[in-house]
Amino acid sequence: MTGLDIGVYVPQMGFSYDDVLHRALRCEELGIGSLWLYDHLYGPGVPEISSLEAWTLATALLSRTDRIRIGHLVLCNQFRHPVVLAKMATTLDHISAGRLQLGIGSGSIEDEHTRAGLPWETFAERSERLAETLDILSQAFSNGTVDFAGKHYTIRNMPIVPGAVQQPRPPIIVGGVGEKYTLPLVARYADVWNVPTYALGQLERKLSVLRSICDDIGRDAATITLSVEAVMALAPDDKSLPKVRQVAEKRFGAAGFGIHEGGLIGTPPAIVERLNQLRELGFQQVVLFTHDRATDETLELLASRVIAAL
């Protein structure tokens, strides 16, 4: 079997910069492959709680680390013009010596758009915008210039210099499982497909649909890295498992987090077994919400008894 890359999702809601930096540094020290942030103007549903801006935070973290890869699951396409985003991405790829992971989606929270005066539109329209952005980013990374005329964006001979450090380009991650709009974008543009927590109960079906779409457009589905995000409730032993489970249920019990469908509740041997099952399905990356928001104890347990066993 191929290797399995383990990342940690650290949504920055309620965290100070020092809180997030500490987690990034610990992940790097422990050999955890990647750290991921969200891209919202405030924590979904809790606008009164502090929340650091996503791109600025990623830039700061990448400038303070040496090896760990950092990205977003996922950037909101509505927040940044695609040419500006291409310049931001190539610049941060240089700052980080090629460690940027570029996750992007069509936007998921209507309320933050309304508050900010940003257009929300229908999902079909937002998906059209995302498709154009993905085309523009692909041009920027491969050609160093963008010349594009679409429904939503028109760009004329725009240089994107310097180009990215990573070759052939920084990985473009598209998340989601919608069969009408999202999976066709994955098949056409993505280097990595990320399955969100809400779809953990549909992994095999959605994978089959993606492969079918790839066949239709003549792309080898094996060229797309398969990634999944899931909640992990990791306990050091059976005695502590009930308390860990309770914390996970309290924090991530809503149906959209798929805590039971993910199957990542248990001691290290159980977690390793489930991760190996995901690997056998073809997934090459797992991004974990930890039950305790990535405390030192859990990160060390993950590294020493789960990743080491894999």
Image (cartoon, rainbow, N blue to C red):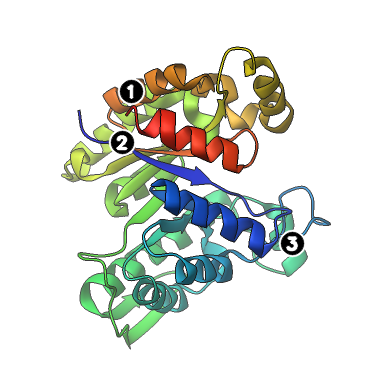
In the image, 278 versus 44, the foreground residue is 278
- Which residue is at a point 70% across and 20% down the rendered structure image? 243
**In the rendered image, the vertical position of residue 296 relative to residue 271, given as above or below:** below
Which residue is the extreme one toward the top?
238
Residue located at (56% from left, 52% from top): 23
Element type at mark 2: loop
Circles 2 and 1, Cβ within 8 Å, touching? The answer is: yes
Relative horizontal placement of residue 167, taking residue 200 as reference (left or right): left
What amino acid is labelled 1 in the image? Asn
Mark toward the start of the polypeptide (3 vs 2) = 2
Amino acid on which disc 2 is placed: Leu
| Front-lying residue, 122 or 91 | 91
Residue of label 1: 276
- From the top left corner, tell me how far across and down residue 280 is, in percent: 27, 23
- Marks 3 and 2, Cα distance to the nearest angstrom? 39 Å
Residue 4, label in figure: 2
Q: Where is residue 277 in the image (x, y as percent from the top left)?
A: 34, 20
What kind of residue is marked 3?
A: Thr
The residue wearing badge 3 is 114
Instruction: Indicate whether 77 appears above or below 211.
Output: below
Crowding near the residue tagged with mark 3, few <14, some 14–19, many ≥20 C-alpha atoms within 10 Å: few
**307 w.r.t. 60: above or below:** above
